[in-house]
Amino acid sequence: MALFKKGLVVALSSALLLGACGTETGGTDNGSAEQTTESTEDKKVVTFESKTELSTLDGSTYDLPTTNMYLNITENMYRKTGNGNEVELGLAAKHEESEDGLTHTFTLRDDIYWENGDPIVAADFVFGIQRSIDPESAVYPSTSDEIIVNADKIRAGEMELSELGVEAPDDKTLVMHLAYPSAIFDYDMSGGRWAPIQEKFYNEVGAENYGTSADNFMASGPYKIQNWQTSASEWSLVKNENYYDHESVDIDQIDFKVVPETSTAVQLYESGQLDFATLTPDFVPEFKSHEGFAQDLTTFSGNMEANQKVDITANDHFGRALFYAIDREELTENILADGSLPVTGYVPYELDKNVEGVDFREEAGHYYNFDAAKAQEELDAAFKELDIESAELTMVVSEDGQDPQVAEFIQSQLENNLENISVNIEQLPLMSLYERLGKEDWDLAYYTLTPFLPDAFAVLEWSYTDGINLSQYSNEKYDELLDQAKYDFGTDPRKRRDIMMEAEELKVYEDASNSTLHQNQRSYLVNPEIENFETLPVSGYLYFRNVKLNQ
């Protein structure tokens, strides 16, 4: 289950986005058979797994399989470079920004076409953006749209769609008017939500049918999709010959097969029927030495929350006692054992880098390096303030994947490193866990989550008083700091980062409501003949434009 709010995806279990951290074991041979790549003078074909069926091709949906396909069949003003979170000009030849950061003018390339050969024009962007905000459309609302002038009032039915802050003075020019400056607007314009849609085609297939099959979607990116409808277990991405940069696209066709079980995917990979298979953590030790084994850091992080509506866990000293008492290195090395990194802040590594390349996590520092003595000091201070001598806590956790094992580790750390603390674990189905977090009858929670934007703010805004806010955290100063970062300093990245670091320290250390414990690696097997392949850390992770097949 994924919760969609504020343009984010919160995954309450490591079962999501890349599949469960399963408990299957595979007695497979580590030898490698010849893979499925077809390589002739004219055609190169590879076969990849998909953990789930593809539900839609509507790019306004924050569904991971959709995002993976959309990255490759659609292009926006900017496109992914394939190098981490970097973007570069895509369908736009030029992007001009006003000094106040509120007006963005895009000049389109002269050589851009839809897959059917029709020119891509600025009006296609206007229609795509208007559709994402139109209250009459079936598009899931996102508060990320509020940055466009009048979007919030249009969504509320208070203004007409024609009053949205986007216009096309001519076929080659798109002008967007923002309500406040954005520090990551280039990245926003590389995504699917505001991507172009040809109005003529959209009306021909019908709003209710758009994106429901390969025939009801028109590509603007390096690939087009074939042989897909919503119930399909197999489909293909085929090179789009009308894409302006098609000559640099090396792979002619990527076939996809739905393979939910990791053990099955591994067997198919080793028998040469797959060129790519993701690995759940329990398979990592077995395949670490495999020639095709690879890992990429993701922005998925495992988090521990202290309920701020419960007197004991809302106590600042008590929260710090809990977070100091957990040895994150032991967790990542001996429990997860999959290459995950220990994290002692809130914002993960490699999410947000400034123009000098300095990572937010590295600059902000580390709050909770393991220290059992300091943990006990904080607990003693908490017991004194609360006038209690012991505490019995209830920790809720998903029953999926490795979440129960992580919860048991947290339980043992707290009970062994703190005196007079006991922890009871309640394992719940994912939906039930989410419902439970909305109540007050829990003390601690463990879950994983990931942002969909490469910006520290995308994590910090989860804890707005009216945000997703799973720990029910509320601090007026924190909200004020985030408002400043959001509305006032979009054109001053240094000041904006300083404010965000201050906000993180307030929530994580001073108020001690949350601590990230670990950051996940994405582990997979990939045919060694495939070059330049890297999974992206944020949003969708499969991007094929730069991938090469070594002859």
Image: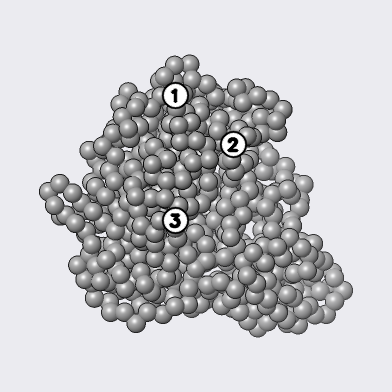
Dot 2 amino acid type: Ser
Q: Badge 2: few (under 14), some or many (20 or more) residues near its Cα, within 10 Å?
A: few
Viewer-side label of 1, 2: 2
Pointer 2: what residue? 137
Q: In this view, does 177 lie above or below 5?
A: above
Q: Earlier along the polypeptide chain: callout 2 or callout 3?
A: 2
Q: From where the camera sits, is residue 538 visible?
A: no
Dot 1 amino acid type: Ala
Pointer 3: what residue? 231
Does residue 251 appear left or right of residue 16 in this picture?
A: left
Quarter of the image holding residue 486? Answer: top right
Q: Position of residue 463 (x, y in %)?
A: 68, 52
How far apart are the two marked residues, 3 and 1, measured between alpha carbons? 34 Å
Viewer-side label of 3, 1: 3
Does residue 478 appear left or right of residue 195 in this picture?
A: right
Q: Badge 3: few (under 14), some or many (20 or more) residues near its Cα, within 10 Å?
A: few
Dot 3 amino acid type: Ser
Q: Which residue lies furthest to the left in this view?
A: 41
Q: Where is residue 273 in the image (x, y as percent from the top left)?
A: 27, 66
